[in-house]
Amino acid sequence: MYKLSIIDKVSLILVVIGAINWGLIGLLDFNIVEILFGDPANLIGRILYILIGTAGIDMIILFFKAKKSYK
């Protein structure tokens, strides 16, 4: 079984936050990141979106690592 590193755990949390944010945008047109940090053009908001995107890539890599460890 694959053991999650600290980076994988943080990435998982960021991906969940991103998924909840996208769900709220789709359902209610409510953007948590924009409410908390301002317009996405704001530097902090942009950095957060970049971190969430990077976390998504890390989760894809984690998926393939975990898949190989089960074989």
Image (cartoon, rainbow, N blue to C red):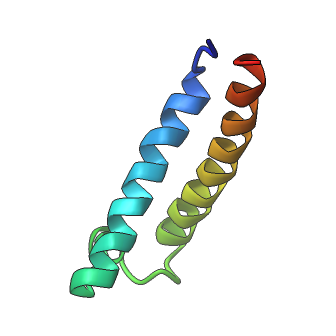
Quadrant of image for the C terminus? top right
Is residue 63 visible in the rendered image? The answer is: yes
Q: Is residue 25 above or below residue 55?
A: below
Q: Residue furthest bottom?
A: 29
Q: Would you identify the image quadrant in which residue 6 lies?
A: top right
Horizontal and vertical percent position of residue 20: 33, 62
Q: Residue furthest left?
A: 28
Q: Would you identify the image quadrant in which residue 4 lies?
A: top right
Q: Is residue 1 above or below residue 15?
A: above
Which residue appears at 25% of the width and 82% of the height?
27
Quadrant of image for the N terminus? top right
Horizontal and vertical percent position of residue 7: 60, 30
Which residue appears at 27% of the width and 74% of the height?
24
Please count the marks in the image.
Answer: 0
Task: Using the image as rendered, state which of residue 55 and residue 3 is in the foreground.
Answer: 3
Which residue appears at 71% of the width and 29% of the height?
67
Task: Using the image as rendered, state which of residue 52 and residue 69 is in the foreground.
Answer: 69
Horizontal and vertical percent position of residue 39: 41, 84
Task: Judge left or right: residue 71 versus residue 29.
Answer: right
Which residue appears at 35% of the width and 67% of the height?
21
Is residue 37 visible in the rendered image? The answer is: no
Horizontal and vertical percent position of residue 63: 67, 37
Task: Using the image as rendered, state which of residue 41 and residue 11 is in the foreground.
Answer: 11
Q: Is residue 21 above or below residue 56?
A: below
Task: Using the image as rendered, state which of residue 41 and residue 6 is in the foreground.
Answer: 6
Task: Judge left or right: residue 14 versus residue 21.
Answer: right
